[in-house]
Image (tube, rainbow, N blue to C red):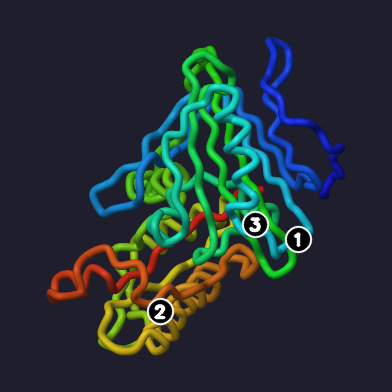
Amino acid sequence: MIRSLSVLLFCLASAADALDLTLTGAVESARVESPADSVRLPNAAWSPESVAPEVEGAITRTVQQIANPAMTTLQLIEPLRRRLIEKGYREVFTCADTSCGGFDFRFQLDLLPAPDMFVDLGNYRYFLADHESNAPSKVSIVASASSSAAYVHVTEVSEVSIFEFPLVQQEVTEDAPQNEGLISDLVAVGHVLLPDLDFGTGSSELGTGPYASLRSLASWLSQTPGARIVLVGHTDAVGSLEANAALSRRRANSVRDRLIAEFAIAPAQVAAEGAGALAPLASNLTSEGRAENRRVEVVLLGIE
C-alpha cells in the first residue's frame, strides 16, 4: 500500500541518520532493505561486450511515485543529482533511454518490480554517483513515467559486515543440474534465454519438444508460486517492425500456453510480450546473427 511521506529537506546522513533522498510531493510505494546482498550498478551504456559491475554491501531500494506524469525524467532526477554533487558525491555515469541501450540496459538494472516501479523503455533516465567516505557509498537513480504517474527508483549501497552461515544440505534430483543453471541465472541476472525452443520459419507455433529449458522453468515456477515472469519474444530484422512485433508476441504466447497447458502453471504467474527486432543479440546482416536473434527470453518481475 502507498504511504504518504512528509516533505523533507535533502540532507546528508549523519552517523545516526540515513541519507534522505525524498522528493517533494512524492509518496513511497516500496522499500526493500538487505543487510548483505549484491546489486548491479551499470557504469556505462549497454553493449554486447559490456558487463554491469556487481557491487556488494548493505542495499536499500526504494520507489517514490509522484502524481504528475507530465514531469520529464530530467526534472525528476536533477534535484537528487544536484544535492548529491553538492554533498561531495562524484557523478560516475548518466544516460537516457536509447543512449543507455534501451531494452537491454533496462533489464540489467536490479529494480523493484511492478506495480511499484514502472519503466517506459522509450522514456527513462539513469544516474550513478559514489563517495569515498560517505554512507551510502554508492547511489543509483532511475526515473520514468506512465500515463498516470512518475516513478523514481533509488538504490543505496553501504558497507556491511558479512557473516558466515551454516550450509544447508539439499536433495539432488536428476533434473537439478539443468534447473540450477537456468534458474540461478534467472534469479541472479533477472533474465535468461530459453535456448532449445524450436519454431517453424515465420511461424509462431512451438514445436512438440520436449524442451529441457521449459521443464526446468516449469519445475521452478511450480515450487515458487510467488514468482512472476514475462516471456519476451524476439525476431530478426527481416520484415516490417509491425509484423515482427506481432510475430514475437505470438511466439511468446505460444510458450506461455505450453507452460499452462502441459505443466499446469498458474496463468497469473506468466505474461507474454514481444520486442520484435528491437533488441538484437547479434548482427542481422548474417544468417548466423539472424538465427541468434530469433529467440524467447524469460524476464523475472519479482517473487512475492
Tell me the residue at 50%/52% (across/down).
220
> Would residue 164 be found to the left or right of residue 290 on screen?
right
Q: Position of residue 2 (x, y in %)?
A: 82, 49
Residue that mark 2 sits on: 248
Is residue 64 or residue 182 the one in the foreground? 64
Q: Amino acid at mark 2?
A: Ser
**Contact flag, marks 3 and 1 (Cβ < 8 Å):** no
Of 114 and 219, nearer the camera is 114
Q: Which residue is mark 1?
A: 68
Asked whether residue 74 appears in the rendered view, the answer is yes
Q: Which mark is residue 114?
A: 3
- Which numbered circle lies on residue 224? none
Q: Position of residue 296 (x, y in %)?
A: 38, 69
Q: Earlier in the sequence, mark 3 or mark 1?
A: 1
Q: Secondary structure at mark 2?
A: helix
**Numbered disc 1: secondary structure:** loop
Q: Earlier in the sequence, mark 2 or mark 1?
A: 1
The first of marks 3 and 2 along the sequence is 3
In the image, which is nearer the foreground, mark 2 or mark 1?
A: 1
Tell me the kind of residue under disc 3.
Answer: Ala
Horizontal and vertical percent for residue 68? 75, 60
Marks 3/2: CA–CA distance:
22 Å
Single out the mark in the foreground, 3 or 1. Answer: 1
Residue found 51% across the figure and 54% down from its top: 300
Amino acid at pointer 1: Asn
Would you call the spot at circle 1 few (<14 residues within 10 Å), some (14-19), or many (20 or more)?
some
Residue under the point 41% across and 43% down:
184
